[in-house]
Image (tube, coloured by chain):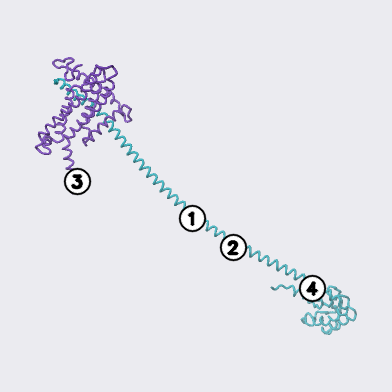
Amino acid sequence: MHIDLWTLGLQTINVLVLVWILGRFFFRPVTAMIAARQVAATEALDEAQAAKAEAAAEVAKAKEEAASLTAARTDILQKAVAEAEKEKAALLAAARTEAKTLRDAAHADIDRARQSEEMAEADHACRLAVDIAARLFEKLPAEARVMSFIDGLVAGVAALPDATRTGIGADGVPVCIKAARDLTEAEKEACRAKLAQTLGRPISVAVAVDPVLIAGLEIDTPHAVVRNSFRADLDRIAAGLTRHDH
Amino acid sequence: MNSPLTIEPVFHIGPVPITSPVLVTWALMALIGGFAFLATRRLQIVPSKTQASLEALVSAIDTQISDTMQVDPSPYRALVGTIFIYVLFANWSSLVPGIEPPTAHIETDAALALIVFGATIAYGIATQGLIGYLRTFAEPTWVMIPLNIVEQITRTFSLIVRLFGNIMSGVFVVGIVLSLAGLLVPIPLMALDLLTGAVQAYIFAVLATVFIGAAVGERRKTTRETTQTERKTP
């Protein structure tokens, strides 16, 4: 076995040269590119991490704003609800007050209507009663319609003040006596006599027929009226019945 | 067929005989160096398929060095990577008709082993200093100094003989079969030679890494122990 030292040396040099060539033109650029890619990947990851953190911060901020908006919305809604409740209460109170006023007014109207109806019914009843009484009185005898009223008429004249009484039938003026029918001479004389006695001087009488009186006598003077008739009585009764003091 | 144990010069440059392993090695240097130069001219951040393949190769070499030596692979990448690539392509050069692989001659294997031997010493001294490196021969005791020296020499010879024997035998067997049988019969043996060549390239590179790693390993162990002591100290 023979080892060629020239070949051994040349091969050693060749391999060392190849080590330098590959180290210079292969391993160095490739490892540099790998390192550059790792740096780029690291930077990209850092940027992604930063972007992620930024996005997370934005999300947190957005959530915070959303929570703030929700709180503000809730606050506004609560205020609106409270205001609406207040407005509702005010409207209800106003409506109740107005309804009470209307109800009171309606009750007052109803009461007034009922009172006026009652009054109308009472008037109607009075008039009906007076008419019934008047018709009943018309059935009295003719004498009774005059003679029985002379004393009452004279008493009414006697009750007049002196000045008024003095003016009745003074200066020869006949005393106007109203009656439901024309008086007979006896009735005229009876009236004249009793009036003269009451007045203390002689007088003359004149008769005015007024069927409305039904029965009785009345004297009209410029300053007084003496009434003693069924009509006057019925008028007083009707006035008494229809007086609405309540 | 020429004997694989003998070598004849193809031509002479002055007094220097140029043999076929040297010529083939020059051709491989031109081929590998030219390809490396062309392939790395326009490297991009987004790699092409070729660039990705080259980066995968470099990453695999780095990973192998890191796993074996437990250190940063950059000081050793060029040597170990070049040894692997050269031995691989030298072994596979037998596929080219008429080309005899340089690693089938003991001079090439001896050159590679000598480089590994020199690198072991150089890296050992560079990391531990001359005294520190020499002190490793007295590990674990000074009695082991002769054995450690013999180990340095024998493992270098084992590198030479392993690569030479495997590749030379493959070439020899294929040549014998080719001379006895037809044209297609040696093809399975050539395919086996491909596998053997790749495995031998890997083994040679890994053993080189292991030897260099052993040379710098004591320094690494000392550094680790110092760091642990500093951590324990309050």
**Which quarter of the figure is the N terminus of chain A placed in?**
top left
Which residue is disc 4 drawn over? Answer: A129
Q: Are marks 3 and 1 in contact (CB under 8 Å)?
A: no
Could you classify mark 2 by the number of other residues whose Cα lies within 10 Å: few (under 14), some (14-19), or many (20 or more)?
few
Q: Is residue B126 above or below residue A100?
A: above
Q: Earlier in the sequence, mark 1 or mark 4?
A: 1
- Tell me the subunit letter for badge 4: A
Q: Earlier in the sequence, mark 2 or mark 1?
A: 1
Question: Which element type, helix, strand or loop, lies under badge 3?
Answer: helix
> On the image, which quarter does residue B39 sit in?
top left
Q: Is residue A17 above or below residue A203?
A: above
Q: Are marks 4 and 3 in contact (CB under 8 Å)?
A: no
Q: State which mark lies toward you, 2 or 1.
A: 1
Could you classify mark 4 by the number of other residues whose Cα lies within 10 Å: few (under 14), some (14-19), or many (20 or more)?
some
Question: Which element type, helix, strand or loop, lies under badge 1?
Answer: helix
For marks 4 and 3, give the CA distance: 136 Å
The tint chain B carries is: purple
The tint chain A carries is: cyan
Amino acid type assigned to the residue bearing label 1 in the image:
Lys
**Mark 4 vs mark 3: same chain?**
no
For marks 2 and 4, give the CA distance: 46 Å
- Tell me the subunit letter for badge 1: A
A95 on left or right of B113: right
Which residue is disc 3 drawn over? Answer: B231
- Tell me the subunit letter for badge 3: B
Which residue is disc 1 drawn over? Answer: A79
Tell me which residue sits at (14%, 30%) in the image: B154
Amino acid type assigned to the residue bearing label 4 in the image:
Ala
Could you classify mark 3 by the number of other residues whose Cα lies within 10 Å: few (under 14), some (14-19), or many (20 or more)?
few
Q: Any mark on residue A97, and which?
A: 2
